[in-house]
Each structure stands twice: as C-alpha cells, then as structure tokens.
Amino acid sequence: MIERTYTSEITEAMDGETVSVAGHVHELRDLGGLVFVIVRDRDGLIQGVFKEDREPELFEQAEELGAEDVVRVTGEVTESGQAPGGVELVPEELEVIDEADAPLPLEISKDVDADLSTRLDHRGVDLRQPEVMAVFTLKSKLMDAMEEWFQNEGYVDVETPLISKGGAEGGAELFPVVYYEQEAFLSQSPQLYKQILMASGFDKIYEVGTAFRAEDFATSRHVSEISMFDVELSYIEDHHDVMDVQEESLRYALRAVADEAERELDELGVDLTVPEEDFPRITFDEALDILEAQFGHFPEDPTDLDTKGERLLGQHFEEQGHPAFFVVGYPGEKFYYMQDVEGDDIASRKFDLIYKGQELSSGGQRQHDVDVMKEVMAENDVPEENFEFYLEGLSYGTPPHGGYGLGIDRLVQKVCDLDNIKEAILFPRDPTRLTP
Ligand code: ATP
Ligand code: MG
C-alpha cells in the first residue's frame, strides 16, 4: 500500500509530525508567491501551503498542478487558525500520481448546481463532491446497522433468484430476459421465495437484494432497478409483530446514523431526528378520514393512498412529532395477504410504512393456508398455474408468517433529504438511462 494518512486522522495534536496525504486536487488557490493546494480524500480536505521563498522547487511543481490531479503530499502538520479543520501541511514532497484531463465536465469544488441529468451523465465525477459522496458513506453505515440488528436478533441472511418465471405482482412491470429457450423475467420481489423459506422452517430471514420494475414513471421516487431490504418471520400472532420488527430495526439503524455518521449529516446539512416514540399505526379508513377532514383530499383510487395523500398524511404526523407511521389494512389486497379475518376491524393485514411523507415499505401478515389462498385466487381470477411452485412450496405445512420489503433507496433519499431517489443511487436506472 502507498503510505498515507486519512485527512480525518490529522488533528491539531499532531502539530510538528510529518505525514503523507493522498487524494485529488480539490482546489488550487494561487496568490502569487503562495499556492494553496487543497487535497481531498474520502474523508475530507486538507490544505498544503506552498511558498515560493520557502521551497521554490515545490512551489513551481504546485503551480503546474491541475484540478483533480491525483497527488500525494508529504509535509509537516502545522496548526493554523485560518485553515479549514485547524491544520495545514508545510510541504516536504509533492508527487503527481495521475494527471486529470481538463476541462472537467462538472465543477467539484465550487458550489455550482448542475442539473441532475448532467450530474448523472458524469456520475463518476459527480460523486467526487463531498456532499454527494456523503450519501453513500452514510448509506453504508445505515445498512450495516440495519443488518446488525437482524444478525443480533438471530435472522438468517438469504439470497433468492433474480431470474424468475413470473412475478409476484404480475405481468406489465416485468423486464423480460432471454433465458435459453424459455421466457423469463427479472425479479420484481423476493416475496414468494421468502414465504417458501418460512414453510421450510428458516423461521426468520432477511435479504439485501435487487428488484426490477419496468414501470413507466417520471417521478422523483421511482427507478427501474431498486435495492431492497426484505424480511420475513414465522410464528407471528398478527401483522403487529411484523411492524414491531420494522419499527425497532429502523430506529436502531437511524440511531446508528445519528451517532456514527455525524460528518456525513453535517456535509449534507441534515438534522436527523430519530423517532424514539412508538410509530403511530392508523387504519386505512382513519387515513382517509384525516385526508378528508384536514385537507379535503380524496385519493383517486379508493383502495390505495396516492402520492399526494401520503405527503399530506406525512405532514399531519410530522406536525405531531412523528416522521414515521404505519397505515394498516388496505382493502382489495392481493391473495397472499391475510384478509377478512373475523374480529378484525380492517380489510386486510397489509401495512405500509410511511416516512417523511413517502411510502418506504409494504408488508403484512401473509395467508399461510393454501386452501383459503386458492379460494381468494379463484374469486379474483388469478390462475393457479402461474403460482404452482409457490402453492406447492406452502402446501406441506407452513407456520403463520409475515414480512415486508423496504426500499433502501427511498430510505436513503429520505434520511438524506434528497429531492430525487436517483441521488441516493450510485448509478441509477430509469426508462431512459442505461449508462453510466
Ligand atoms: P409505489 O406505490 O410507491 O410505487 P409499490 O407499492 O408499488 O410502491 P411495493 O411493491 O410495495 O411498491 O414495493 C416495496 C417497496 O419497494 C416500496 O415501498 C418502495 O420503497 C420500494 N419500491 C417499489 N417500487 C419502486 C420503484 N419503482 N422505485 C423505487 N423504489 C420502489
Ligand atoms: Mg407498496
């Protein structure tokens, strides 16, 4: 390894020590006889101070540098009131490791807002901006903590196929793939497989995976390739057990971000509040009542909340100090959700988690009785042949179970307060974007 110290490790206490930093030339400030070379590594910035009268050869070298060249600067750590971070380097050596072409397609160091499409066209360069990279170092910490919660609770980490014969949700939103001589599709959700694994006796599982949706959208919350965090657990009493898991794991992950991603939150200008109180759980009918009474809003489809409805409900609960809440009991649900249960005051045991005014996940208690499921399928004209492997998988003894699928990209978007979900994805895919 090339010897270097991360900028985050260099503190005022190291005054007088010699260190090497390696990174990109973030900014050059030539003041005539004095050049500030600001070097950026993954963690931050540090400035090297090159003076003509102090070290003329190094000064000359510094004057030749270009923005985004990759360099290694070795020098003495010196406390400085004016320097960002309180320390600067008095250089002893400057190595140019790789020169960058000029001009750059995007400004890195100056606060010039390029439109999102241009940024994504040059994503490799766009990601160099500290506030853009911060999204992904934060995401890494967030999802590490999320997995940690599930590992601590004894969940098994699984992988299900990305190429499948059909989808959980049906035809129109599937991407076809050429699979030898057969018709196949990219997976839209691991749900059916998760349920078969419950029948197998895995008891508690999670999967960090990818799902594909061939939706023709132009929204700020949809993409074609999604990162999903999927969970399934057995021997639940009802859907509340599933919501408990979602609530506790999300709180744990958000706490970890608040504690361990201070630098990133600061870079992003986000003031993250961890929802410590219980997330409200309202029924679908109560949600409609709030929308009507408070906002005079009626969702177009009376069996679902629309984007505006979610946003308005989000506003309603945010004002009461609840950024996250569940809506429970959607009517007209798919055959795989438990529904019309005697004694329930809800149409189904399906819930959505809404966080900062946007749906983050859908889940609920599943129907584990295959005979009941077949009846519901028949009533809704769902052909059994499309689900043979699934029905077979559940027919030899299945414990009561439930789970959910959380959209990781939407979670990151909301935690980081980003306008568009694509900003939360390194190389996003949408109906018109296939590169980079
Ligand atoms: P929406 O109604 O917002 O389009 P959905 O109800 O169709 O979402 P689900 O099938 O419930 O989505 O998928 C579970 C989760 O996966 C969603 O709550 C969301 O976080 C995420 N998700 C689904 N589709 C997309 C998409 N096209 N882009 C980004 N995230 C998505
Ligand atoms: Mg949903």
Image: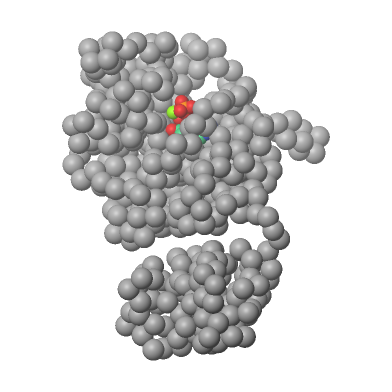
Q: Is residue 88 visible?
A: yes
Task: Report the residue that reaches farthest toward the right.
Answer: 181
Residue pictured at 65% horizontal, 40% vertical: 163
Number of on-image labels: 0
Residue pictured at 68% horizontal, 71% vertical: 98
Looking at the picture, does residue 175 appear above or below residue 408? above
Split into 4 quadrants, where in the image is the N terminus?
bottom right
Residue pictured at 60% horizontal, 38% vertical: 117
In this picture, residue 225 sits left or right of residue 351: right
Choose between 418 and 53: the one closer to the eye.
53
Choose between 133 and 395: the one closer to the eye.
133
Choose between 162 and 15: the one closer to the eye.
15
Counting from the top left corner in percent of width and height, residue 97 is at: 66, 75
Q: Is residue 191 visible?
A: no
Counting from the top left corner in percent of width and height, residue 152 is at: 33, 58
Counting from the top left corner in percent of width and height, residue 170 is at: 58, 23
Instruction: Write down the quadrant of residue 266 in the picture.
Output: bottom left
Counting from the top left corner in percent of width and height, residue 161 is at: 61, 43
Residue pictured at 64% horizontal, 66% vertical: 66
Instruction: Write down the quadrant of residue 125 in the picture.
Output: bottom right
Choose between 145 and 388: the one closer to the eye.
145
Q: How is the image coloured?
A: one colour
Looking at the picture, does residue 340 appear above or below residue 69? above
